Amino acid sequence: MKVLLAAVNAKYIHSCLAVYTLQAYARKWGRPGLAKEVETAEYTINQPEGEILGDIYRRRPDVLCFSCYIWNWETIQNLVREAKKVLPGTRIWLGGPEVSYDAEKVLRLLPQTDGVMRGEGEATFLELLEALDTGEGELPELEKLPGITWRDREEIRKNPDRPVLDMNRLPFIYQEENIESFAHKILYYESSRGCPFSCSYCLSSVEKCLRFRDTELVKQDLAFFLKHKVPQVKFVDRTFNCRHGHALEIWNYLAGHDNGVTNFHFEISADLLTEEELSLLETMRSGLVQLEIGVQSTNSRTIREIRRSMDLEKVRAGVERVNAAGNIHQHLDLIAGLPFEDYESFRGSFNQVFAMKPEQLQLGFLKVLKGSYMEERKEDYQLVYQSRPPYEVLYTKWLGYDEVLRLKDIEEMVEVYYNSSQFEMTLPRAIKGFPDAFAFFETLADWYRQKGMMEQSHSRIQRYELLLSFLKEREPERQEEYVQLLTLDFYLRENAKNRPVFAGEDRTEKAWARTFYDQEEETHRYLPGYPEADSRLLRKMTHIETFTYDVLGNMEGKTLRILFDYQNRNPLNHQASIVVIE
């Protein structure tokens, strides 16, 4: 019996933890030979559906299983309908959060499917294989199988739920024989399941049983990642630091076994960080870990209504403490469309989170997930959302659709000009001309739309030019200051030998630069890390820019020569290291 576990990812760099875990679990705990022909296949939503269908057909599975999420659900519906036409004898089963909470409806929508595996799928998938491998497929066997909703001829039947799984029974999916297949992809890992909180918009709150993998097993798994120097591992634990002993032991292990390359991503609650954890984080290599923190809102009534537990002052203190060490990328999230959060309230939430100075501020929009408490309260909140995935908010009792659209424009500006880390020197100066940070991005978004620039595709250089045009209109008397700040931002990121037009004439005299590099070849005063490099190579790896303002200080008029070293970059924002040439 040939079984295909198919994943349709949002991007090529993603990998689907679910299908590999199901495969590994069946191979470890199934009877010998049962899981021998269980294959996995990963596609993306950007591939032509005909191409995906053709690959599935060539594999000729007897059982075809899809892992279903909001980002791939529409694609999978189409694939299910077409796959049944070309593989009429293939049994089709679905699993994942997009189908677990209304499985009966899914089976009515897709008569081509045989059943849905609800919730955690590892044990269910293994027992389903055993039932289907008996020879006939065998309705009596399916009657005994917990955790499925299935088609019994013309009847749809729902079996009892399955007890939650012991995390220590999960096999580690990455092995010597398959690690190369994950090259150039983000690797995902889980050390716990469930969540201690009950946020109304999140499906993790539906399942109350919080479980952890034994830390000794976790360390063995992490040792594999470290040995192979994979670029990034993302922990999918919903609140990694909810059990302090667990988090501290793992972070201590990573700090003590750092390979100098691998980055580990964690979703945490900043208000739960202890002094011991903060002290440890401060000692870590820059770039060893990064933290994602879901603030969602700073409106206290909104926080209570969504059944979220958060101490905003502790969040602020934790984020600022981590920021002060300068070694950890922090990603803070806000959600627009939550109850009791109108446009002005969201403005306040944005400004408070922006003031915490995260490396990234994600302005997201509420998604009303099937099975969530938010979905139950949609009438009370006059919550209207898209009928199709990702079920994103359109408007609420407090936030109109026109305001949602305006926030979408602001989100784009934040993504381009803040989250890119390409304008870190210009933005603080520009924002001073506005009542607050939100007003800056709001006005910039309105300007983009008025100029017809919002839906256009722009090059990186054009983003600099557009920001300069905007700032020139606002503060024409500061035009040259902004030119030089943007030039500084540009060369912090770009080792460009073709000077951008907006930067104007090069103020560094060629004869002076030639003399500088000749002397540097002999003395290595400013570039001591390149003792063998000659002046030609030093020039290739660096750039010198001459400014007439103190762009690193208070913008007073003065001559300032800055040397940019592109071989030594900040791992948090990828900026070149710089030194002022005296």
Image (spheres, rainbow, N blue to C red):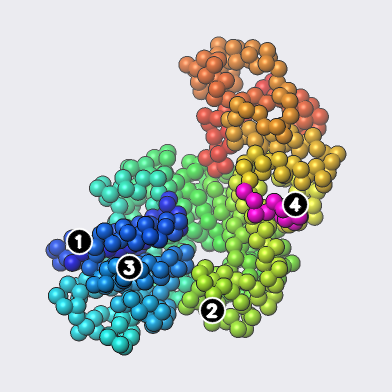
**Mark before the other along the chain sequence, 1 or 2:** 1
Residue sitting at 49 percent across and 58 percent down? 267
User: Is label 4 or label 1 in front?
Assistant: 4
- The count of marks equals 4
Q: Residue at x 42, y 82 (%)?
A: 105
Left or right, 74 with respect to 199, comes to: left
Measured in 3D between alpha carbons, the distance from the residue under mark 3 to the one under mark 4, in whole angstroms, is 46 Å
- Which is in the foreground here, disc 1 or disc 3? 3
Residue depicted at x 67% and y 67%:
404
Mark 4 lies on residue: 451
What residue would you read off at disc 2?
Answer: 375
Foreground tag (3 vs 4): 3
Residue 301 horizontal side relative to residue 142, left or right: right
Label 4 vs label 1: CA separation? 57 Å
The type of residue carrying mark 2 is Glu
Nearest the camera: 397 or 162?
397
Query: According to the image, label 3 marks what residue?
Result: 83
Q: Which residue is mark 1?
A: 37
Mark 1 in CB contact with mark 2 (< 8 angstroms)? no
Q: Position of residue 327 (x, y in %)?
A: 54, 43
Residue 212 visible at all? no
Residue type at numbered disc 1: Glu
In the rendered structure, which segment of residues is drawn in magenta?
Answer: 443-457
Q: Residue furthest bottom?
A: 155
Q: What SS does tag 4 mark?
A: loop
Q: Is residue 78 above or below residue 481?
A: below
